[in-house]
Amino acid sequence: MLSVNTNISSLESNSQLDKSRKKSEQLLDQLSSGTRLTSASVDAANSAISQTLEAQVRGQNQAVNNAYDGVSMLQTADGALSQLQSNSQQIQDLAIQAGNGALSSANRQSLQQQVDQLTQANSAIVQSTTFNGTALLNGGNSQTFQIGANGSSDNQLTVSTPNLSASAASGGLSSYNSNLNATGTIDITTPANAVAAQSSISNDLNALSNSRTQLGAASNQFEAAINNLQNSSVNLQAAKSRISDTDFAAALSQLTQQQILGQAAVATQAQANVSARSALSLLSG
């Protein structure tokens, strides 16, 4: 039917042109942003999944940072324990030397001065070793680290640090004194005292060794958690990529298709308008 009030062909061509334009704009957005999910309306279900995966990935990445902080804290404590071991071993050597019957009292007093310097150094290390304001060797503190993206208890690791300022009977060091200028904390001025000092320092060395073993085990837990989190994060990001990232080859192919369809719609609309004008030629004829 030839009419002028309603040009169906023109309307259909215009509708197709509008669809091609909107699809082309969407594809251009996807190409420029690199993501297929430029808005929730594009794919509501996958958009929700993508956001969930993004939250999980970011949570795991932060958990990795937390675990690295835990490793740093333990390395700080272990470095201090290593120095305490070295100092204590020197005290042990001096105590054994003081058991030499050929030494005079003056000789032993000289050795005692060296021991005093080492015990003062040990006391200072115990009191001053901290990580972000938290004492690591003084007070027996416990720190809990979130090492997972979820808030459950199995995503947490609690680390207890030794209390070397306690009495020797409670696991502390015999070479520790709260007075950093104290002398005679370990006494080797007589052969009998030197023998007793050797026993005390031997206990100190055992305590330090046990503390380092415990911290080393905790450090291994952190490292294992970091490896697991990093592997999981990579897999989650790969899954998110498959859902949300733009497939450039496919998008460019679809864009070319929509551009051709748009050009065809323009040409068709022009022909539809010509058909409408032919009705006027009948009136003029």
Image: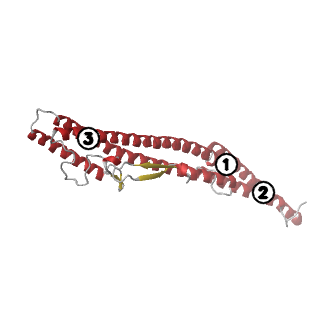
| Side (left or right) of 39 relative to 264 | left
Q: Amino acid at mark 2?
A: Ser
Quadrant location of the N terminus?
A: bottom right
Say what secondary structure mark 1 lies in: helix
Distance between the Cα atoms at labels 3 and 2?
A: 91 Å
Say what secondary structure mark 3 lies in: helix
Give whichever of discs 3 and 2 has the lower sequence position. Answer: 2
Check residue 88 in the rendering and tell me which mark sits there, or answer none: 3
Is residue 66 among what the camera can see?
yes
The residue tagged 1 is 255
Give whichever of discs 1 and 3 has the lower sequence position. Answer: 3
Check residue 151 in the rendering and tell me which mark sits there, or answer none: none
Distance between the Cα atoms at labels 1 and 2?
A: 19 Å
Q: Give residue 191's position: percent from left, percent from top.
A: 16, 38
Q: Give residue 80's position: percent from left, percent from top.
A: 31, 45
Distance between the Cα atoms at labels 1 and 3?
A: 75 Å
Quadrant location of the C terminus?
A: bottom right
- Tag in front: 1 or 3: 3
Q: Give the residue at x 29% y 50%.
A: 126
Q: Outermost residue, right direction?
A: 1
| Side (left or right) of 142 relative to 207 | right
The residue tagged 2 is 13
Q: Outermost residue, front direction?
A: 192
Q: Give residue 142's position: percent from left, percent from top.
A: 42, 52
Circles 1 and 2: CB distance less than 8 Å? no
Q: Nearer the viewer, residue 99 or 124?
A: 99
Q: Amino acid at mark 3?
A: Ser
